[in-house]
Image (spheres, helix red, strand yellow):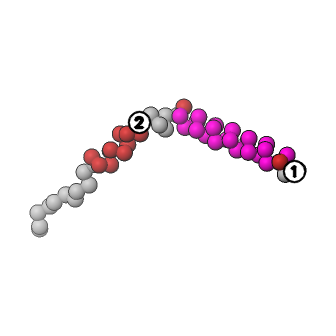
Amino acid sequence: MDILYMLVPLSVVLVLAIVGVLAWSVWNGQFDDVEQEGERILEDDDSPERRPPQ
């Protein structure tokens, strides 16, 4: 039962840290445009340049 005196405050601190990291990422624009970044890789042209043989 004495372990609860340590685990409850520790879990509250952990939850506050997770909420703080989530709030920081939202305020800094990490979730502004999640759709475009996923589609950008599909639109990228990675085909090698074809050069005539020398």
**Of the image marks 2 and 1, the number of the one nearer the N terminus:** 1
Q: Position of residue 31 (x, y in %)?
A: 47, 37
| 27 and 3: which is toward the camera | 3
11 displayed left or right of 26: right
Count the numbered circles shown.
Answer: 2
Compute the Cα span from label 2 to label 1. Answer: 47 Å
* Picture layout, residue 25 above or below residue 44: above
State the extent of the magenta-drawn residues as a range. Answer: 5-26
Question: Residue 1 shows which numbered tag?
Answer: 1
Q: Quadrant of the C terminus?
A: bottom left
| Magenta-colored stretch includes residue 47 | no
Pointer 2 local density, CA inside 10 Å: few below 14, some 14–19, many at least 20:
few
Question: Residue 48 shows which numbered tag?
Answer: none
Q: Quadrant of residue 34?
A: top left
Tag 2 near tag 1, CB within 8 Å: no
Question: Residue 33 shows which numbered tag?
Answer: 2
Q: Amino acid at mark 2?
A: Asp
Q: In percent of the image, x 37 and y 45: which residue is there? A: 38
Q: Amino acid at mark 1?
A: Met
| 46 and 25: which is toward the camera | 25
